[in-house]
Image (cartoon, rainbow, N blue to C red):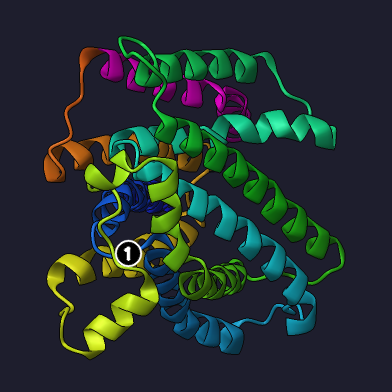
Amino acid sequence: MRKTIQLNRAALRADLLLLLTAAIWGFGFVAQRSGMEHVGPFTFNGVRFLLGCLFLLPFIIVRRKRSKVKHISLQRLLLPVLAAGSCVFIAVLIQQFGIMFTTAGNAGFITGLYVVFTPILGIFLRRKTGYATWFGSILTFIGLYFISIAGRPSINPGDIIIIISAFLWAVHVLLIDRFMNTDIKREETIDPIELSAGQFAVCGILMMLGAVLAEPHVIPAVERINPALLIDGLFEWQPFPVLVSAIGAGEISLSLDILIPILYGGLCSVGIAYTFQVVAQRNAPPAHATIILCFEGCFAAFGGMLLLSEKVGSWTLLGFALMLTGMLATQWEVIRGAKKVTG
């Protein structure tokens, strides 16, 4: 009896940690959108992912010393890190540009489409996709219609960009699954925190290279394509080389408006939230984890309304509800499987 109570308490703590993780990630969309008012997309993500990597390094050192499990060598870890990190780099970059043209709430819910895309892409890996997944997918895309199209003269281009990033996040999930399972068969394990820190480092380095080489050309390119976007204030930030020069000359100070979104994105969204997820999933069933993390979009919408004064109409609320229902429906088979194991 006492053991059962302890297990229930551990599961409850794990669920609360996962809910906190979903909240941190949801509010992270607010940080991404507000951070873009001051720094470019490459700079913002480069700094925050490198911060996230540095945050995880102490955990890696401690785990390496205490663990009795044989860890994969750094040489063999290189390929998974490069592949996963490159995928994260492309997905985050596309997502960051999409957020400039849509709300934090829309971005949060649409990014959750990776929950739907993952089992669908799994078909090409000869994985079975049940009726619940297809039903949930239909509901999700109906919800997407109400978010992006219903009552509007045209489709929001930012929503389309976020859909592309959600597809890439699904590819990332399958990549991670493939690498982890492959190394388990070889009787060596990839520490999930090591893999995360490595992919964050790769993403951060690629972003900073982009900040130096590509960011100065973004605003001139936008000006040639659609000058109205500059008038709307979507591209008020300074390119990284100009920003560094201005800070060095004292023309721009590192105010809280600049630091808070970057620190939140790096330490909270990347470092703390991922650590919470890893710790929580030791005691939380996979079904619990999947369901709770689906609420990331709800927190993104709430954060957008609370901190960015984003207005949410009736069509959008209906779309949010349908998308959340659809994402949960795609996990029905996981939920049913968990009940059979515990029942």
Would you call the spot at circle 1 few (<14 residues within 10 Å), some (14-19), or many (20 or more)?
many
Q: Residue furthest top?
A: 151
Tell me, yes or no, if residue 4 can be seen here.
no
Q: Is residue 255 left or right of residue 153?
A: left
Residue at left offset 27%, top offset 59%? 35
Q: Label 1, on which residue? A: 268
Q: Nearer the viewer, residue 275 or 240?
A: 240
Q: Main secondary structure of the magenta part?
A: helix
Q: Nearer the viewer, residue 160 or 10?
A: 160
Looking at the rendering, the stretch of residues picked out in magenta corresponds to: 315-343
Residue at left offset 32%, top offset 45%? 26
Q: Quadrant of residue 158?
A: top left
Residue 335 part of the magenta segment: yes
Tell me, yes or no, if residue 83 can be seen here.
yes
Q: Residue furthest front?
A: 224
Residue at left offset 60%, top offset 66%? 192
